[in-house]
Amino acid sequence: MAEKVAKHLLDLVRSKNLKPGDQLPPERELAAMMQVSRPSVREALRGLQILGVLKVKQGGGIYVSSLDASDLLAPLQFLITLNIENVDALYEARLIIDARIGRLAAARIPDADIERLKNLLVVQKDLITDPLGFRVADSEFHRVIMESTKNPFLVQISSSLYVLGMEYRRLAAETPGVTRQSFADHQVIVAALEARDEDAAGKAMEVHMTNVHRSTLEAMARAKE
């Protein structure tokens, strides 16, 4: 019964009858509306909270989450950190997806986005010794490239994979030389995009993902020592 309640609530979210930020009725009212027991409602709500669809705000009340990738992928992010083998699978997926994104971006990216990326390179150069600042600029760098493909499915998939790897990148970014290597990779990527060279852009993204994967594994290995 709890599963049916959860499915019904998910259907309301999918159909946009429940939108990000909407507050759900109290547990007692939900049980009455759905004609189920309060324990069934409570179990369904707990499950949807674990999945990141619902959130409990301070002061009480259950709300629909922002439904951003960071919210919906939080459970997966927790799970993936438990198994180092998943790191390889994660970057294997990013290698495939981001290489294709690089090729599409080279063919479709507008001049304004090229200038945006060049400006980000200037910012990143000054943040090489600032791991936190560099990660923020890195997120924006990849967002611009993703969205330049004009493919919402690739954007969602790539951003989701990026979110899953954020904790790993935090470890790696604090290792000397890693942000400098990423900056160098970014320069090659931007040059390929500006030249509208699809093959070079795809290859540059592959090289970048390979470097990111290697530095992440090295950082995790050192963390265990």
Image (tube, rainbow, N blue to C red):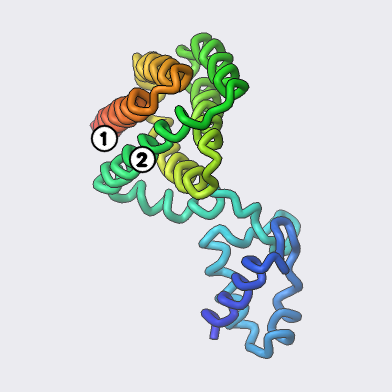
The first of marks 2 and 1 along the sequence is 2
- Please provide percent x and percent y for residue 142: 49, 30
Q: Quadrant of the N terminus?
A: bottom right
Q: Secondary structure at mark 1?
A: helix
Disc 1 crowd rating (10 Å Cα; few below 14, some 14-19, many 20+) is few
Residue at (37% x, 19% y) in the render: 185
The mark lying in front, picked from 2 and 1, is 2
Point out which mark residue 188 bears.
none
Left or right: residue 201 compared with residue 152: left
Quarter holding residue 171: top left
Distance (Cα) linking label 2 and label 1:
24 Å
Front-most of residues 198 and 69: 198
The residue under label 1 is which amino acid type? Lys
Residue at (46% x, 19% y) in the render: 190
Q: From this view, report whether residue 10 is shown above or below residue 116.
A: below
- Please provide percent x and percent y for residue 83: 28, 49
Left or right: residue 111 compared with residue 186: right
Identify residue for label 2.
94
Q: From this view, report whether residue 138 is shown above or below residue 176.
A: below
Residue at (46% x, 55% y) in the render: 75
Point out which mark residue 224 bears.
1
Front-most of residues 222 and 102: 102
The residue under label 2 is which amino acid type? Arg
Residue at (61% x, 77% y) in the render: 8
Front-most of residues 207 and 9: 207
- Please provide percent x and percent y for residue 39: 59, 82
Disc 2 crowd rating (10 Å Cα; few below 14, some 14-19, many 20+) is many
Q: Secondary structure at mark 2?
A: helix
Left or right: residue 112 compared with residue 124: right
Q: From this view, report whether residue 79 is shown above or below residue 115.
A: below
Q: From this view, report whether residue 163 is shown above or below residue 208.
A: below
